[in-house]
Image (spheres, helix red, strand yellow):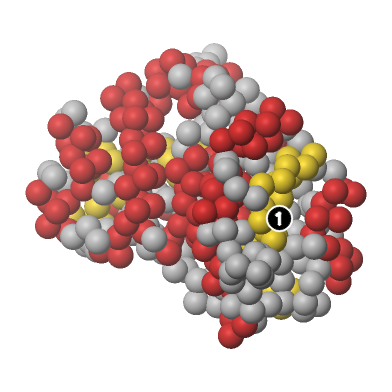
Amino acid sequence: MNIGIPKEIKIEEHRVSLPPSAAREFVLRGHTVFVERGAGLSSGFTDNEYMSAGATIMDSADAVWSDAELIIKVKEPQASEYRHLRPDLILFTYLHLAADQVLTFAMLDSGAIGIAYETVEDGQGRLPLLEPMSEVAGRMAAQAVSHYLERHQGGRGMLMGGVPGVAPAHVVILGAGTVGASAAKIALGMGARVTLLDINLDRLRYLEDVLAGKLTTLYSNSINISRAIQRADALIGAVLITGARAPMLVTRDMLPAMPEGSIIVDVAVDQGGCVESTRPTTHSDPTFEIDGVLHYGVPNMPGAVPRTSSLALANATLPYALKIADLGLHDAMRGDPALQKGLNTIAGRCTHPAVAETFSLDFDQPLLALDLLTTPAPLPL
């Protein structure tokens, strides 16, 4: 199979979907890997390293997209890339369709086969291709809180861990999944007082046992959230519903109750955000202020540490991508229920229930849509 690795063009996105070591695995199995010139430079991977791994360097993105059967990316296609989408193309990347109606319909109209990292789900309900970036984003969220609590950054002028005789910062985290747990781990390690809210009591019990420090767990409901953020120096939004838009847990009218100079880091912004006042920002202009509360809404937080993120992402995605390349789409899908859940679009059909519900689309079961794709049209009489 021909594998394409285009350079990421989303603003301030520096990751690459496959480092040279991962590209080498495809080559060893007899596949051809096309890499756009310079695709890995921002992550510290040179064209020479890709060539040494057996990949072919292409001078343009157009050449990579047109010659590839399987495109492996990091972020969703940007508007200028929609023209590359076509019915026989398999696109394997973060799609986040439920947060982007324009992209959703571009995928459907093109007939492209879209497999979303964030909806690949194993038998235990885990999201193995979202997990590594969630770990990075959670850790970075705690670092961002520490940074933006400084006075010259617009914050309250607080040290995360305080000092003897002075209370530490109070960090409230909504969601106890991978992002929330990673954020709590780093914040506690910095000496902060952490309140962690979730609706999964078993998860809260587990984290209360394994995370040492000043940790309080609360069941997530509107009253507990409202009370918690009134005493918060920082709020981290870390909620996720697989494939769907993030639930709105903090409304605009709740902001005035937060302390002046507090900071909100909404990691859920790439799924629409769980704070009503959140909007997407960039690494070069990451924050804005509403009602005295600083907001940080960078959707691609792991893009700021691209080498770590690219390696971590490829570690998770490579087995699935190799399965598609080795077996072909249909056999790979039929043999792997986790991969089936990653299929979001095929031949103009929506195959993820949360995306279909978000945009009031007809939903097709992934395997049925695959069967329809491979069933030959009846011969004319």
In the rendered image of this protein, does residue 83 appear above or below residue 204?
below
Q: Quadrant of the C terminus?
A: top right
Q: Is 338 on the left or on the right of 103, as rendered? A: left
Q: Considering the numbered disc 1 on the image, is that residue within a helix, a strand or a loop?
A: strand
Percent x, y of residue 156:
68, 77
Residue at 34% in and 30% down: 319
Query: Residue 302 location, x and y as percent?
Result: 46, 57
Left or right of 134: which side holds 308? left
Task: Give the side of residue 112 with respect to residue 239, left or right.
Answer: left
Q: Amino acid at mark 1?
A: Val
Local crowd size for mark 1, using a 10 Å CA cut-off: few (<14), some (14–19), many (≥20): many
Query: Looking at the image, which is closer to me, 105 or 7?
Result: 7
Q: Residue at x 56, y 22 (%)?
A: 124
Q: Nearer the viewer, residue 7 or 362?
A: 7
Residue at (72, 77) in percent of width and height: 261
The quadrant in which the N terminus is found is top left
Extreme residue toward the front, this view = 165
Quarter of the figure with residue 227: bottom right
Q: On the image, numbered disc 1 is attached to which residue?
A: 172
Above or below: residue 106 compared with residue 60: above
Residue 100 seen in the current view: no
Name the residue located 43 percent from the left edge and 60 percent from the top edge.
303
Q: Does residue 57 show up?
A: yes
Look at the picture and state if 336 lies above or below 31: above
Front-most of 128 and 333? 128
Front residue of 369/282: it is 282
Q: Which residue of the protein is positioned furthest toward the bottom in this rendering?
A: 152
The x, y position of residue 318, in whole percent, is 33, 35
Count the marks: 1
